[in-house]
Amino acid sequence: MRLDRRHHWCRFSFRGSELVERVVIVGGSHAAVSVADDLRKHGFEGSVTLISEEAVLPYQRPPLSKAYMSGEMSLERLKLRPEHWYDEQNVQAHLSSRVIAVDRQAREVVTEEGARIGYDALVLATGAHARTLPGDFGGALSNVHTMRDLGDADALMAKMVPGRRLVVIGGGYIGLEAAAEAAKKGMQVTVVEAAPRILQRVACRETADAFRALHESHGVTILENTQIARIADDGTGTAAAVELEDGTSLPCDLVVVGIGIVPNAELAEAAGLEVAVGISVDAHGRTSDPAIYACGDCTVFPFHHTPTRLESVQNAHDQAGIVAANIMGQDTEYDPHPWFWSDQYDMKLQIAGFNRGYDRVVARPGKREGSISHFYFMGETFLAVDCLNDAATYAMSRKILAEGKPLTPDMVADEAFDLRGFAR
């Protein structure tokens, strides 16, 4: 699909002393669409070309393992922008097209079909892909799936049938969300986590305990500190069982692998850009080539003086806004205020902040029955909060974090403390 320009645009941007007339965005991610949208909002009237490998217009990814798989959200609602938006905003969308090289000297991208598209500013918003198990572990068997894109979600929805047995490898948010949807559909679900507990990398023990209890109340079996030996083939290229290192065999009809993501940095690396577990960018979203920017899940950027990858809609949207502003010559630095969420059964988890480096967690009950929030501190410094069915505390905490107010552990521990008043 290609949506061509219909108008002549005459107002461009200056980045330093260079005239920017042509912006090319590689990727069909949330970040990619946000860059295009923000450029137009800033008044950029040069050409904007978006190149995506996927056959459908860019769509939201977080709901794939939540509302989309449950049937609550249609594909049309999933799309980040309707088709007419690309015409109205004069964004040329090249779908089913893969960029295989960046010619930095000529300032052109090269597609698999051999087309060369010139740019004055290039944005890599290439996202990430799901980490897979090696083939000798059984990762290539026909009923072993990951959960990252629309094709993954559609394939899983077709196979999630009541009574079938699902083994989920990985107890992070993606794995647990897939487990929840499968359990709701009447499947027999087992989650296998290699770490000592689920959510080990991303959440405190208290939050993990709440989600473990939630899943077990819906009949899900959770095996922690458990290593996979291999996925056994039934002889026809189909997984028959997940075999554990202790000799246990878990019969299965379906396997979902949720063991993290890998940034799509191959294009940048091949072009000679600096790459370090993602495409390295500075606070302005610039790569080691000043004409090339990057944003979203594919990037590593300085956050609180530490190279950081944020896998979130917030980062994709906000970092894209910084990139667009800097293409327009605004010299803006990225200072993110992270937020995340997960929906599982009737539990809505909302996370504000980034819990890296915490050494203390303080629990605070919410006003609604069964709601609770877990506040993360490093010493006396408030870092982040996990709000479980506690939207009011989440909203107040985001405001407190954004404004840098000195919330302390003692304040949180005191249930009589007026958190709402403090947030104001």
Image (cartoon, rainbow, N blue to C red):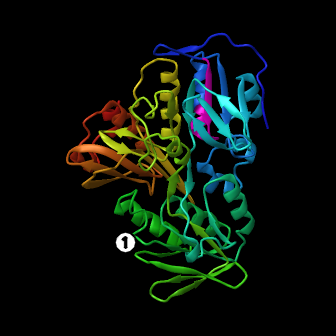
Residue 133 versus residue 192: which sits nearer the camera?
133
**Residue at left 62%, top 50%?**
63
Residue 212 versus residue 137: which sits nearer the camera?
137
**Residue 352 part of the magenta-drawn span:** no
**Residue 25 part of the magenta-drawn span:** yes
Which amino acid is tagged 1? Answer: Pro
Provide residue 214's location: percent of width, then percent of height.
49, 66
Dividing the picture into quadrants, the one containing residue 238 is bottom right
Provide residue 23's location: percent of width, then percent of height.
61, 25
Asked whether residue 414 appears in the rendered view, the answer is no
Residue 265 versus residue 181: which sits nearer the camera?
265
Provide residue 121's location: percent of width, then percent of height.
56, 26
Dividing the picture into quadrants, the one containing residue 35 is top right
Q: Residue furthest top?
A: 10
Which residues make up the magenta segment?
A: 21-34
Residue on which the image places disc 1: 196
157, above or below 291, in the image: below
Quarter containing the N terminus:
top right
Q: Is residue 384 left or right of residue 174?
A: left
Q: Is residue 64 left or right of residue 18?
A: right
80, above or below 120, in the image: below
Provide residue 193's location: percent of width, then percent of height.
46, 71
